[in-house]
Amino acid sequence: MTVTVPAPTSTPASPPTSDLAVAAHGVVMRYGSRVALQGLDLAVPRGVVYGFLGPNGAGKTTLMRILVGLIRPNAGSVELFGRAYSWRDRRRLFSVGSLIEQPSFYPYLSGRDNLRVIGATGGPTSARRIDEVLGFVGLTDRKSDKLKTYSLGMKQRLGIAMALLSDPELLLLDEPANGLDPAGTVAMRELLRFLTSQGKTVLVSSHILPEVQQLADVIGIIDRGRLIREGSLKRLLEEAALLRVRIAPNDAEHALTVLAPFSPQLEAPAYGEREDGWIVVRVPPDRAGEVNRLLAQNDIFASGLESTSDLESVFLSLTAPGAGASGPTAAGPAWVQAPPSGSR
């Protein structure tokens, strides 16, 4: 997948937090007795990539379907670009592009003809625009081939092109990297960055957290239909930063005493075939020199210092079973459930 868009000529200014592309207020959505969204609030600034994260069944796709008018919430309200949005207001969706769940196309039409058919259902779409978006996703050479000859990754790229047809101000993408090879994933990232450099807003829902970490400016994490964390990626990672210090076995006890002022609940390092004596200190990475200096002043010399702060750790700490109470269960993988009493 090759992106054929020009590089941005300048770095865009940070969007004002008061200028929102999407604002959700107390949104409730029920499917029978199951509540998918429980008073969800969300604030997506303009001109950013917003990483929308949550476990399976958390309500991410439900909200995206509400935003494009596929379903109506039971309660709450949604604003698009500062104006209240109603499911009757169909024309306003011309400024919203979306790829939600698996894209559907006509297998016996070409990629280009599929976009022509889809383009006819919305605002006016020129042949030039169709060719332009095919170029954005690297399908120019395959635009005349029938869709049934496309790979999964090519169909996904065509889905992204479909979402871009109306030159939308807001782009909603549900698992956009699905089926893409590494080069295609990088190219998609460059494309989305180009779009935000032009002032557009991208809301991405994905389970590929390392990719979201490289792409997103702002993160929103939901669990069981409620927003549990929202803020800039930089701030979330700083708050979750850890420093790992590797200490020789004979210095371990002394090191724990010396480092106690930094992190009172230090755990003794483990040693063995799979463990090599790391102490985890809960301090920001910019204090690594301070930690190292204090150890050296006490004749303890670390054989390794590394900072760790990743989106996956933040996500799991907020959404794992028991998070916020006694912590995740240690009985086994989080998705393994004990059988009902009396079952075999």
Image (tube, rainbow, N blue to C red):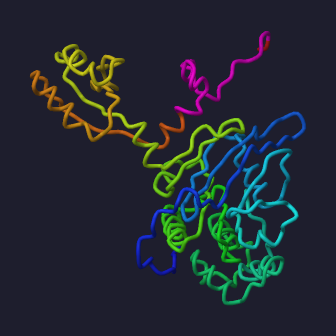
Residue at image location 81% in from the left, 80% down from the top: 117
In the depicted structure, whether residue 6 falls above or below residue 182: below
Q: State the extent of the magenta-drawn residues as a range.
A: 317-342
In depth, the one of 173 and 170 nearer the eye is 170
Residue at image location 57% in from the left, 62% down from the top: 180
Residue 17 in percent (x, y) is at 54, 56
Q: In which quarter of the image is residue 260?
A: top left
* Magenta-colored segment: predominant secondary structure: loop
Q: In this view, does 133 lie to the left or right of 271?
A: right
Q: In which quarter of the image is residue 154?
A: bottom right
Residue 84 lies within the magenta run: no
In the depicted structure, whether residue 173 falls above or below residue 29: below
In the depicted structure, whether residue 267 falls above or below residue 282: above
Residue at the right extreme of this rendering: 32
Q: Quadrant of residue 99?
A: bottom right
* Quarter that holds the N terminus: bottom right
* Quarter that holds the C terminus: top right
Q: Is residue 217 left or right of residue 297?
A: right
Residue 333 in percent (x, y) is at 58, 27
Residue 57 in percent (x, y) is at 72, 40
Q: Is residue 322 left or right of residue 5?
A: right
